[in-house]
Amino acid sequence: MKFKKIEHHQVKITKYYEVDDEVLIKEFGSVEEALEDNWEDFVDDTEPYDSEDDWVSDNKGTTEFEWEVVEDEEDLRKEFEDTLEEDDEMSDEEYDEMIGDIHEDNDD
């Protein structure tokens, strides 16, 4: 007998960047102007030097699980494809609500 377990996870990825002051001055005129301007887009175009993954759902014990019995390999493949289609059909409002719930959990 075959079984399928679907885990719904939320992960928070923190990326660290370092940009030389000279580069900021060349791009924005001064470090102060960079901090007052749209520096986020500029920094986002550079490579981070480090990153951390925080699996919020695991750490807070809020991972949701679904179990199903799968009759054969073809059924397993079909169920997986159906699940992907359902995820793709999530509305922006549903996604925003889900993200809002995660942020509320993080504030606790």
Image: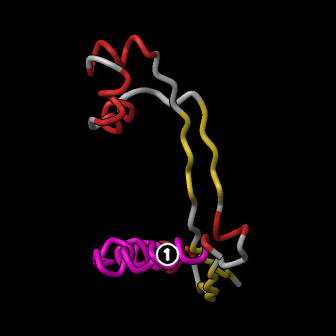
Secondary structure beneath disc 1?
helix
Per the rendered image, the range of residues in magenta is: 78-105
What residue is pinned by disc 1?
Answer: 74
Residue 27, placed above or below residue 56: above
Q: Is residue 107 left or right of residue 96?
A: right
The C terminus, quarter of image:
bottom right
Q: Nearer the viewer, residue 92 or 82?
A: 92
Crowding near the residue tagged with mark 1, few <14, some 14–19, many ≥20 C-alpha atoms within 10 Å: few
- Residue at figure coordinates x 65%, y 61% from the top left: 55
Q: Position of residue 36 (x, y in %)?
A: 31, 36
> Would residue 96 appear left or right of 104 to someone viewing this image?
left
Question: Is 93 left or right of 59, judged from the image as shown?
Answer: left
* Residue 18: % across, % down: 51, 25
Label 1 is placed on what type of residue? Glu
User: Where is residue 66, by image quadrant?
Assistant: bottom right
Q: Looking at the image, which residue is at 46% across and 16% down?
A: 20
Residue 78 visible in the snapshot: no
Quadrant placement of the N terminus: bottom right
Between 6 and 24, the residue placed more toward the observer is 24
Q: Main secondary structure of the magenta part?
A: helix
Closest to the observer, 56 or 105 = 105
Residue 104 drawn at (x, y percent): 54, 77
Residue sticking out furthest to the front: 32
- Does residue 4 appear in the picture of this structure? yes
Magenta span contains residue 91: yes
Q: Which residue: 35% across, 81% down?
A: 94
Number of numbered discs visible in the structure rendering? 1
Q: Relative to 96, is 64 on the left or the right? A: right
Identify the coloring.
Answer: secondary structure
Give yes or no for residue 98 being in the magenta stretch. yes
Image height of 104 relative to 55, above or below: below
Residue at 60% over, 39% down: 51
